Image: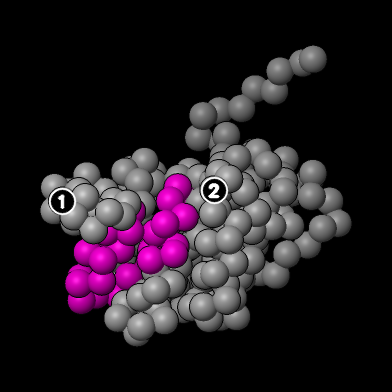
Amino acid sequence: MELEYVLPKDIERRSFELIEAELGDRKLPDDIRPIVMRAIHTTADFDYYDNMYFSDGAVQKALSAIESGAVFVTDTNMARSGINKAALARHGCTVECFMADPDVAEKAAAEGTTRAAASVDKAAGLGRPVIYAVGNAPTALIRLCEHIKAGSFVPELVIGVPVGFVNVVQSKELIIESGIPCIVARGRKGGSNVAAAICNALLYMADGRK
């Protein structure tokens, strides 16, 4: 097999060309296309063409939140690290992950819950528009649903892409049923890298609206 020589600065562009070619006649609406494409690019998994769910108006809601200087909250430091900091700064946005905070660990231990759930409680007190990105912990999605139902914390957008087996599928469906603006990878697939990729896709889309 002959290797293809591609300059480092052109690797991402070439990757997207190859994804386009492999998708062939399968088309996506313009408002979700960049997000699905970046999820595929991050994972090399074309299942994201079929399993990505977007609630009505979710992308526009997210872009408006970004333009208002939203804070992105992630359930892993890996996802936090993967979000483009220059793109955040261009929009006056920030990113937080509370999973390693001592007060979160103490609250989780005291209440017999997970740090992911306690992190949601902490995010509820931020007092800013929040885009909540979950790539690992279904318990974060479950706690978000509890807050949404109670009206105590309603993010501008929930990105629900935890990966795994225990309560993963169920928690994603709960978020969809909650009526919150959401982007969800239905089924078992997902991960911190996918959560970060979706956040970056939204930030880059917001760049195009400036």
**Quarter where residue 4 is shown:** top right
Can you identify the residue that label 1 sits on? 106
The residue positioned 39% from the left and 73% from the top of the image is 146
Q: Nearer the viewer, residue 202 or 3?
A: 202
Q: Position of residue 163 (x, y in %)?
A: 54, 46
Point out the image quarter for the C terminus: bottom left
Q: Earlier in the sequence, mark 1 or mark 2?
A: 1
The residue positioned 44% from the left and 62% from the top of the image is 141
Identify which amino acid the numbered label 2 is placed on: Val
Q: Position of residue 19 (x, y in %)?
A: 71, 44
The residue positioned 72% from the left and 48% from the top of the image is 47
Q: Secondary structure at mark 1?
A: helix
User: Per the image, is 25 magenta?
Assistant: no
Q: Which residues are magenta?
A: 116-143
Point out the image quarter for the N terminus: top right
**Quarter where residue 33 is shown:** bottom right
**Relative vertical location of residue 153 with respect to residue 41 in this rendering, above or below:** below
Can you identify the residue that label 2 sits on? 166
Q: Is residue 75 left or right of residue 49?
A: left
Identify which amino acid the numbered label 1 is placed on: Glu
Q: Secondary structure at mark 2?
A: loop
